[in-house]
Each structure stands twice: as structure tokens, then as C-alpha cells.
Image (cartoon, rainbow, N blue to C red):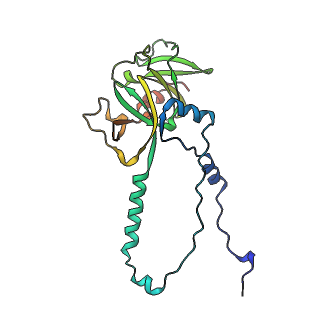
Amino acid sequence: MARSPSSRKKAPRKSHSARAEDASRIALPSSGLAADILALAASGALEPAPAAETAPLVERRAPESEAAAAPAHNISLFGAVREQRKAVEATEHLATFFLSGEEYGVDVRLVQEIIRVSEITQVPRAPGFIKGVINLRGRVIPVLDLKRKLGLGEVAESARTARIVVVKVKERLVGLLVDGASQVLKVPVASIEAAPEEVVEIDANYLRGVAKLEDRLIILMDLPKVLALELREGGVAE
């Protein structure tokens, strides 16, 4: 006897929070000038990435003879291949900048914007690596000379390429003075390795590793660790 439509099982629906998360994902370009891409993201010009649509799966039961003939280890083998493929395809979006001729990258989600160096007001009795504060659209934020903080020298504020990278760490805005901004790009997670000693001159605790691309190396910086002392002691204003 045929079942009534009401007795048929319905496919589980996504929760409201899951649908909202899908709708809020923004697809960043694979690469491009960091300042341009971040400005587009802030203005809302980058549309959220559409949720992937999947066709309904049709269950097909294999004959008992086929099921018996299929080796059990095939399942684990295929699963391992899928996991390996996911690891190879996984990527990270980085915003990159220069310090002493080396290119550094940070998680693009921490970067709010990149601006030209404006007038920096000095703060009395501040540590040497804190250049002062700036007024960013009515909000006063501290500016750190990242180069001096890491013991690599000092950024020339007057240099044509110098920029301030505005980041948000632990709900606080901080400006990082750097020699120059590069771009936002997507790198495969598989290309990231531990940082070799001969590549970097700074404390290895500040690094997450090195992304080895075809034409260059990008040193991945762990910003929360770099700024941990200042944030904990309240040296960086909210």
C-alpha cells in the first residue's frame, strides 16, 4: 500500500545560523594589492560567496554478491585519498607587507585596512617602538613601529612606500608601521613549513612558519603573540 505524502520523511533543513553563516562568507580574489582588496571588502563591494548547491543523493544498493566481493580496505584507502586531497587543496588568505626587504604575511581576517602614513602624535614616556597615536576617522589608535619592535631597525616614516597596517587583535585596533604593503593572496596550506633559522632574524616564537611559493618565500607572522605583552599590560588602547 502506498504511503501518504505526510508519512514521507523530509530532508533535514539547515538551521538559521548555518544559513546565515553560508550567506556571510565573502569570496576574496586569489591575489591583488592588499589596500585595494581590503577597501572593497570594507565597502561591501565583494558579494558573499554563494552556498554550494548539491544534487540529491540517490541510494543504490549493490547486490549481495558485489558487496561480498568488494575488499574492505578500499573504503579506508579512498577515505585517506580524500583527506589528502582536502589537505592539498586547503588555502589561507594572507595580507603581506615588507620589513627589511623580507616579505611577511598575516591572516587577512586580522587586517582592517592599509593606509598611508599620516601625522603621528608622539606619546610621552612610551616605549621606543611605539611611534605614537593617529586619528583614524575620529578614533585614536596607537601606532607601533613593527620593524623596531622586532629588532630589525626602524621604519623611515618619510619613505614613499611606508604604510600603516591597521589590525584588530583581541577586539583592539592597532596600527603597524611597515616598510611597504604588498598584496592579498591565497596560498596553499600544503606550502607552509616551519621557518628555517637561516631565513629569519627575529624570535621564532613570533612566527607560524614560511609559505614557500614558486617565486618567493613569505614569512608568516603570529600577530597575537607579537602583541601579547602590550595587550596584556594594557599598553595598547582599546
Horizontal and vertical percent for residue 231? Answer: 48, 29
What residue occupies the far left of the structure in this picture? 198
Q: Is residue 25 left or right of residue 117?
A: right
Q: Quadrant of the C terminus?
A: top right
Q: Residue at x 49, y 81 (%)?
A: 62
Q: Residue at x 57, y 43 (%)?
A: 26
**Number of callouts:** 0
Horizontal and vertical percent for residue 54? Answer: 58, 62
Q: Nearer the viewer, residue 4 or 122?
A: 4
Please tell me whether residue 41 is drawn above or below residue 20 in the rendered image: above
Horizontal and vertical percent for residue 227? Answer: 44, 30
Please tell me whether residue 150 is drawn above or below residue 87 in the rendered image: above
Horizontal and vertical percent for residue 236? Answer: 50, 25
Q: Residue 135, located in which quarter of the rendered image?
A: top right
Q: Residue at x 53, y 34 (%)?
A: 37
Please tell me whether residue 133 is drawn above or below residue 44 in the rendered image: above
Q: Quadrant of the N terminus?
A: bottom right
Q: Nearer the viewer, residue 177 or 161?
A: 161
Q: Residue 149, located in which quarter of the rendered image?
A: top left
